[in-house]
Amino acid sequence: MEPREFQFVFAGFCVAWAIVMIYALTLGLRERRLRKELDRVRKMVEKR
Amino acid sequence: MREKIMYILAAVGIGLVTWTLYKVWFVLPKEANVAAYQILYFHVPAAATAFTGFFTALALSGFYLGTGNLKYDALAAGVVEVALTFASINLITGMIWARYAWGIWWTWDARLTSMLTCWLIYAGYLILRRAIDEPTQRARLSAFLAILGCVNVAFVYKSIEWFRTQHPSPVLSIRSGGGMGPGMEAPIYWNWLAMACLGTVLVLVRMRQEEISREIDSLRRMAHAY
């Protein structure tokens, strides 16, 4: 495989997994936000 | 139980990806008739995973329309979100390959354009869900769009046979292509399985979030009822 071809193949692989990682990270952040919100609402209900 | 399934699927997915990477980089021939053909090992399985997801969303939307149970709608939304991620991988890896093989990032070829249309339809599905607050109306309209989107998915699948354009014709032997040579096709299917496992894990995480959202909503209703 010539160096230029290798660069493109490597970029393809990296981009593919970077997209999955970014999505997984987004899901993780969303879950953290939701759990914080759940705790906040639970405390609000308990106070009442 | 669900956590266990998630860990098992993630382990299987990561194991299969590692094995496929090893095969692609160290075992398979470095040169072939198609330039930079190794990208195919991500491009094709990503499309297959996305299409599997879109058809799963079609079935779930049908279940929702039949039963009116919002759980099916929530599951369909999660599946579409994950499938769209894999459709993005398909489009972007295709563009990288095109840049190397054709010297251009994009061309308005029927096969490429139909996949982009498919991506836009499902991106529209997710935007539509954000635009409608009323859950039943949101679920009904989303279900119709998911069903409509699948017609386009079938078109994209057949487009690489129907149109003789710049995009290569089918190469896999299961799609009446010429095949890729001994041992060269198997990693594509294993990578599809790996992506399906990882996609299922992401859908399960997404489902857990839907459950937390529902709990937040019910607690809020309870708080307002006092």
Image (spheres, coloured by chain):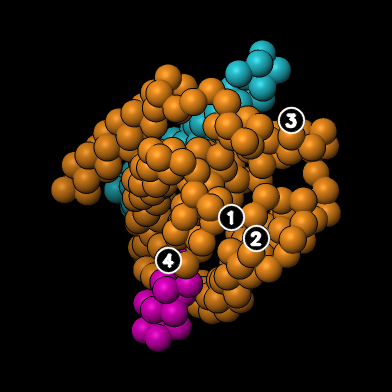
Chain colours: A cyan, B orange
Q: Is residue A8 above or below residue B12?
A: above
Q: Quick one: label 3, few (<14), some, or many (20+) residues within 10 Å? A: some
Mark 4 or 3: in front is 3
Residue holding disc 4: B56
Mark found first going from the N terminus, 4 or 3: 4
Q: Chain of mark 1?
A: B
Taking the spot 45% from the left edge, 27% from the top edge, the residue there is B28
Instruction: Give the Cα distance between marks 4 and 1.
Output: 24 Å
Horizontal side of B164 relative to B176 (left or right) equals right
> For residue B100, which numbered disc appears in the image?
3
Q: Quick one: label 4, few (<14), some, or many (20+) residues within 10 Å? A: some
Mark found first going from the N terminus, 2 or 1: 2
Marks 4 and 3 close (CB-CB < 8 Å): no
Residue holding disc 2: B160
Mark found first going from the N terminus, 4 or 1: 4
Q: Chain of mark 4?
A: B
Residue holding disc 1: B170
Q: Nearer the viewer, residue B200 or B69?
A: B200
Disc 1 marks a residue whose amino acid type is Pro
Q: Is residue B107 above or below residue B62?
A: above
* Label 1 element class: loop
Where does the image place residue B92, in percent across and percent down from the top left? 66, 40
Disc 4 marks a residue whose amino acid type is Thr
Taking the spot 29% from the left edge, 48% from the top edge, the residue there is A46
Mark found first going from the N terminus, 1 or 3: 3
Mark 4 or 1: in front is 1
The span shown in magenta is B57-70
Q: Quick one: label 2, few (<14), some, or many (20+) residues within 10 Å? A: some
Instruction: Give the Cα distance between marks 2 and 4.
Output: 22 Å
Mark found first going from the N terminus, 3 or 2: 3
Where does the image place residue B32, in percent across and percent down from the top left? 58, 32
